[in-house]
Amino acid sequence: MFREIAFRAELDRHIVPECEDQARILCGEDPDNRKNAIKELRDMILERGECIPPRLDDAFLLRFLRARRSIPARAHRLVRYARLVHCNFRCVIIVFREQNPRLWKDVYWYGLARLGNIFEGVLYDRPDVGRLIIGRLGKWDPDTTSAEELVSGMLLLLEVGIMQPKLQVLGGTALLDCDGMTLYHMRQLTPTVAVQAMNVMGYSFPLHQRGVHVINCSRIIEKLFYLFKRLAPVDAIWKNVYFHGYDNSSLHRYIDPECLPKRYGGYREAVSLGEWLTAIKQYKDDNFDKDMSSIGYGV
């Protein structure tokens, strides 16, 4: 019963008083000035003409403001999805969505349920953690699923989640579980895929990234992860990345066990991407399909 209630809540588009208070604290949002901030951001987009977002309605623009402390100028930079990255040792500007249409354009969103248990989430959202999203990289079979499909699945998780005002405010924490991961897996993570993943995980996405925690990771895999730092030499990305080896107690210093699945010494049940998308499909309505279609997904 409680799981079904939680699944229905995944499609809630209302903000409750408690969330209003958190929006003040975490997003610098003033309800009395909210419409003015949205208008300022919309006017900035139209006047500067530097980007053409898929939508300009209040609900869509508000997610970008919340991700950037309700400062229109900062939100405008995020709307562009433009970021400075390292590519072939030369700095270039890329526009994330325009440069990576395969990740989302005409992708049938429910079809990504095939990624099964690679991605999980814990439907227990707290202000200090937000939504906990888990990537079990050792469950990934590179022979049947490309690394780019993994990024596409990650992007879908966030695109659907960010429709909720609650998650726009609380943000999310990523947990990468490397149990079972090998050098064969790492070889599939090309520089292009690594940059895509970093953009999706908050660098060019309207999400409060509360931290990235890597668990069950050998020293060799950890060193290979650090090679990705050369691809995006911006301290903001790496200051919230934590490696815990095989030590759950180290993880607990950052994430309360109350928020973690049992396999990490916690008390929660994780929900697989497949199970979550099946519930979304069951409870969705025409507005959901319209929202997904507006940002390019097949419905």
Image: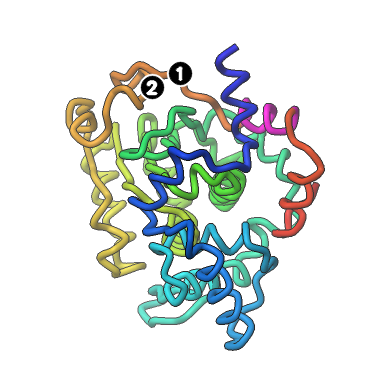
Q: Residue at x 30, y 41 (%)?
A: 213
Name the element at disc 2: loop
Is 146 on the left-hand or right-hand side of 200?
right
Whole-angstrom CA distance, mark 2 to mark 1, is 5 Å
**Residue 171 among magenta residues:** no
Q: Mark 1: which amino acid? A: Glu
The front one of 120 and 8 is: 8
Tell me which label, 2 or 1, sits earlier in the chain: 2
- Residue 144, by quadrant, is top right
Residue 267 sits above or below residue 218 on the image? above
Residue wearing tag 2: 261
- Residue 251, by quadrant, is top left
Q: Residue at x 67, y 56 (%)?
A: 104
Q: Position of residue 160 (x, y in %)?
A: 61, 45
Q: Quadrant of the N terminus?
A: top right
Which residues make up the magenta segment?
Answer: 274-282
Residue wearing tag 1: 269
Residue 281 sits above or below residue 230 on the image? above
The front one of 111 and 211 is: 211
Q: Residues within 10 Å of mark 1 (few under 14, many from 20)?
A: some
